[in-house]
Amino acid sequence: MTEYLVRFLLGGVVVSAFAMLGDVLRPKSFAGLFGAAPSVALATLGIAVYQHGARYAALQGYSMMAGALALALYGVVVCQLLVRAHFRALPVTLLALVVWLSAAFGLLFLAGGST
């Protein structure tokens, strides 16, 4: 229970800090980038370091970076198929989901990780 409370409080503080940073930067569309995801990742890594050590937290960090790369690829595929090819949203989403999963697990495999 204490872990959830620490995660909640630490996440809230970091979300607020990133929200203030996003409010200061231009254009305002950056505010969404500095919302929940970075703060939750930082809180999770902080708790991982505290509970399991730096090596475990490093593995989590590598996994987060691989997931971010896979998500970026997902976004590129969706944008290309929706805007340029004018496909419908549902088939594009399902196809891009397969691309995302393939990229995420492919990067995990290349990094020597296990599922």
Image (cartoon, rainbow, N blue to C red):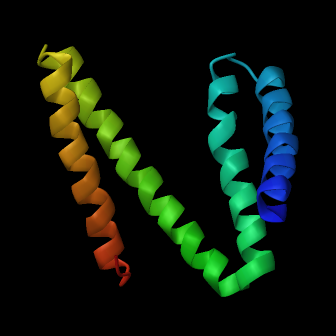
Q: Considering only vertical position in the picture, is 114 above or below 65?
A: below
Q: Locate residue 36, reporting x and y percent.
A: 67, 38
Q: Locate residue 89, reporting x and y percent.
A: 20, 19
Q: Quadrant of residue 73?
A: top left
Tell me how many marks there are: 0
Q: Locate residue 74, reporting x and y percent.
A: 31, 40
Q: Residue furthest front?
A: 1
Q: Considering only vertical position in the picture, is 92 above or below 11?
A: above
Q: Locate residue 83, reporting x and y percent.
A: 23, 16
Front residue of this view, candidates 43 and 6: 6
Front residue of this view, candidates 51 and 58: 51
Q: Quadrant of the N terminus?
A: bottom right
Left or right of 69 in this view: 51: right
Front residue of this view, candidates 103 and 15: 15
Taking the spot 73% from the left edge, 85% from the top edge, the residue there is 53
Q: Quadrant of the C terminus?
A: bottom left
Left or right of 87 in this view: 52: right
Left or right of 100 in this view: 28: right
Left or right of 38 in this view: 11: right
Taking the spot 34% from the left edge, 35% from the top edge, the residue there is 75
Q: Considering only vertical position in the picture, is 25 above or below 4?
A: above
Q: Considering only vertical position in the picture, is 49 above or below 36?
A: below
Front residue of this view, candidates 88 and 33: 88
Taking the spot 35% from the left edge, 81% from the top edge, the residue there is 114
